[in-house]
Amino acid sequence: MIARGRLLAVVFSIAVPTLIVAQAPPPAPAQRPASPPSMAVSDEGIPVTDPVVVRACGSCHTRDDKQRMTRISDRRATPENWELTIRRMMSLNNVQLTPDVARAVIKSLSDTHGLAPEEARGIQFEAERRLIDFAFEADKDTNTLCSRCHSIGRVLSERRTKDEWTRLLAMHRYYYPGIDGASGGFRRGGPPPTAAAAGRGRAGGDQSGRGAEDAQPMDKARDVLSRSFPLMSAEWTAWSAAMRTPRLAGRWAIAGYQIGRGPLYGQLTIADRAGVVDGFTTESKFTYSRTGETVSHKSRAVVYTGFQWRGRSADTPDDQGTWREVEFIERNGQQITGRWFTGAYDETGIDITLRRVANDPVVSGTDVSALKTAASNQRVRIYGANFPATVQAAEIDFGQGVKVSRVVSASPDTLTVDVDVAANARLGPRDLAFGGSSIATPVVVYSKIDAIKVVPVAGMARLGGIQFPNRPEQFEARGVSYGADGKPGTPDDLDLGPLTARWSLEEYAATFRDDDIQFVGELAQSGLFTPNVEGPNPKRSGNRNNIGDVWVVATYNATAADGSVKPLKGRAHLLVTVPLYMEWGSREVGR
Amino acid sequence: MTHLKPINRKAHRVADLAASGFNRTPAADGKDVVALQQLPGPPHFPLGCSLAFSPGWEADSTGGTAGLCQPVERDIFDCHLGCFWPAHVPDQLNHSPNWTGSCATAQKDWRKLDLVFPG
Amino acid sequence: MKRTRASGALLVAAALLGANLLAQTRPASEGRLTGGNGTLYIGGYPNLVWIIDEATEKVVGTIHTKGGIPRRLNLTRDRKLFYIIDATQEVVEVVDIASRATLDTFKLTEGNKRVRINSIEPDPTNRYAILLTRTAVKMTDRVDIGPSTLLQYDLKDHKIMRTIDWPDGQERDQANLMFSPDGRLLYFLGNEVLIFETETFKQVDKWDLSNIEEGLGQVSVSFGGFGGLDTVYDEPGFLTTTLTIEDPVQHRRMVGVAHIDLNKKDLDFYTLGPAGGVNIVLAPDHKHAYGLESAVGRYEFWTIDLDQRKITSRAEFAGRPRMALKASSNGKVLYIYQAGHTIDLYDAATYKYLRTIELDGDVTTGFFVVPRQASATK
């Protein structure tokens, strides 16, 4: 079994030499292909004024008298996408840059040709490497076309002129000629359907006439993307003016959640990082409330475009950044949200919210997420910062029907209280207010556990361990209340938080001869699924890999106290599939 | 079938089957065989998984693994040569022309294939 | 090392018990069932085409390609030459099969202008070839992709003779091309067959297959696929392939066999059953065809009697995704190939798995079964 740290060590030592080259002059003119007169940059192109970028990129991307560089000025993108472009320039276009210059170029272009906060918010999942269900609903054909090979999030992280979208598609077709056909579907592969066939085959569907029907899929996508994601936007124009180095130094309260391990709370300090523009360091300590386990964590980060925090763990001087941090800094400078993640596929993550701590109390959250009606002395721990030494029960307000009967103990960052909930307390969420700080819905009030659900409901694991790293999947069982109406699947249903369940795998009979559970891997009683190794398995029919799709089943033995008498079951679908043979993850962003 | 109205219960069942999208495919020997069917609604594919189903990389067109190559290593040369999965399998034309350099038969020599970090 | 197929054999046996087959049993005195006495060709990694003797199933020779990894093999009508396109799609190599020597290699790529050749069809006299190409130019700060272009290319002088205009000015990304046996006509095969004369390449005729009969509905004929057309078993000027029909009354999709006479522009067809994903190949006796149907989790062999115009047997077998089918030169063995380093042999009469030919490298091209001819080319 390859330890992930070791694999990264091997990788790092391979990757770095390709970047560390003495500052080389631009390629000799004889090597560069002859080209027609330079294309014009669009009128709306954004100038590039940073001499580092001009020097690194200017031998091929010429500048006009308005300081606009070909291609570059017609595009805005996230730091991750800029990094991918620069890496492609180095791997496929003979560009040679030292790591420092490459990082400086990524930083510079992310700042001057980046996304505004409003543009980035909806697609943060892409940088956070978060496996959610997401589709570009505005145009399903474009969503499918681009998703043939990569996440749609990568596409939505771009803003380009129409010509620049066109050139992006041409680049795809240059490097991957098969993309016109079955693998990419950029082009139809034949003449447009005849009028008669079009009429018969699309009964009542397309009424737009032959013109639209004739468009190649790639042209249709280009038009959709040009309309939806043009180069200039009001949000970017405004943010370009407002953008600056955010003021972050100071104390922050951590509220986090890690699937399978539950909530975590702690304190974090951000300091400015000497010698690095928009650079910061952090030191933090947090505790998993379920187990009491405490973790210390250090990181180094760079903020791009004035709000995009990108950090890497720096627990030791040699730490290769096994944990990455992707966070979004709110404009009010009081809250930062994002994800910290690790793993060969970035699959292990903590959802993080940081709240700025000054002198007044700050509430971060609670250890329990559900309170039962008609029950007294329910123990709740409240986490935060700046809690006073003496606290009266009446100062802690959960809302209607919920009374704090006793403050058991109080420390600057934790209050332990006992809570009584009335028999007739309304079912539903409660916001917590204390000491002038409040947070929304740390708990819900419920009367009984009606069901349990397993998350993620659609999981994915990848085989690995011999030649390639694997991707485990952590599942969690959570209680569900059907709410006041007692009906499942209605808006008043309540998520009651994680609970401990018994875990098992069941065959998901996708075909009549399915035998996947014998091969796919092991599901621990912690809910962690560890996949089997990769490679052909001679013990399996047809020498197949250890792939398969299975049910992950959680069984919860409800007690009378939960309000239920029979065991509750929930299940999720798990796809155990093959490795990726390429690793595209961001390596330079945040350094 | 749209112009015929069922007049007895058996006909109703047949009409219901047609409406629910199930095909009944009689085999040559006269036995009915219900072909593998998907319920209405497309299958789910995790974000970032390839949606090119020839036959599929992470999942086949039904969202499962039964349609994937058996084993994947059997067909991997084809994938590599055709740059068929540009984000999943090293492409022969650009980043990794020598990825299979020490590996004549992928099903036997798959341990010699490397994880590639483009750029 | 031969793979065991115990589970596969059990399954096929079970299928045989359940199904109603018109199976032919072989007399016990017959020796090992082989595919005939022809020759099998398949291209592979890193730079060769294997030549396999059909009777012994052994590799008896290799053709070494100078142009790199072979990707697409094109067998000339007289079965004497291969035109090979390499994995970059830029290099064509002409190989003489008997002597295994490379006769010629050429490419159209110059400097930063790549010319990708998607398919090639030489005229019957090998004087020129029709190339389907697309340019891809790498400029300093961008790329430019050209349109799909048909070129007539002089094979002796290595020069482009002309660009052939697309019919109706409609650019196409694929062109299944076939010359008439005398080389005077060039057919673009598709649901519309377009017929060009080969002096000036003007379109002289058109045959719309999608509209052949009232009440028949929408017709779709399949030509080629990965590896292109295989006309080894068809008589010159004829094609046997599959077609799909969606009738206008029931909106039912059905698959059938189409026998196409290019000279007479005649399409003889009949339907076989509901359309699924079946790949049909002709047997050399022209009286049978074999089918391979693949759906996720279900694989079937079919036998089609072309005289009786119906499927005479179907049975499930333990297949796998991504298989392709060819019939052996004696029609008694079915070859299952495509990717990997193996070719599996099945008994065409009973669908029983026989054995596997193992190669020492992964295959990279399509597969050709060439019967022994009177004028031995081995």
Image (cartoon, coloured by chain):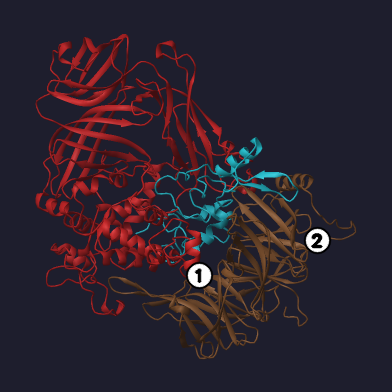
Q: Where residue A190 sits: x, y (%)? A: 48, 69
Given the image, what chain letter belongs to the residue carrying mark 2?
A: C
In the image, residue A15 sits, relative to residue A48, either above or below, namely above
Q: Which chain is red?
A: A
Q: Which chain is cyan?
A: B
Residue topped by disc 2: C33
Answer with left or right where residue A444 lies relative to residue C245: left
Q: Amino acid at mark 2?
A: Leu
What hue represents chain C? brown
Circle nearer the N terminus (1, 2): 2
Answer with left or right where residue A85 lies relative to residue B100: left
Q: Quick one: A448 or A390, which is closer to the camera?
A: A448
Please, what secondary structure does the residue beneath circle 2 have?
loop
Residue topped by disc 1: C87
Q: Amino acid at mark 1?
A: Ala
Q: Where residue A82 sits: x, y (%)? A: 26, 57
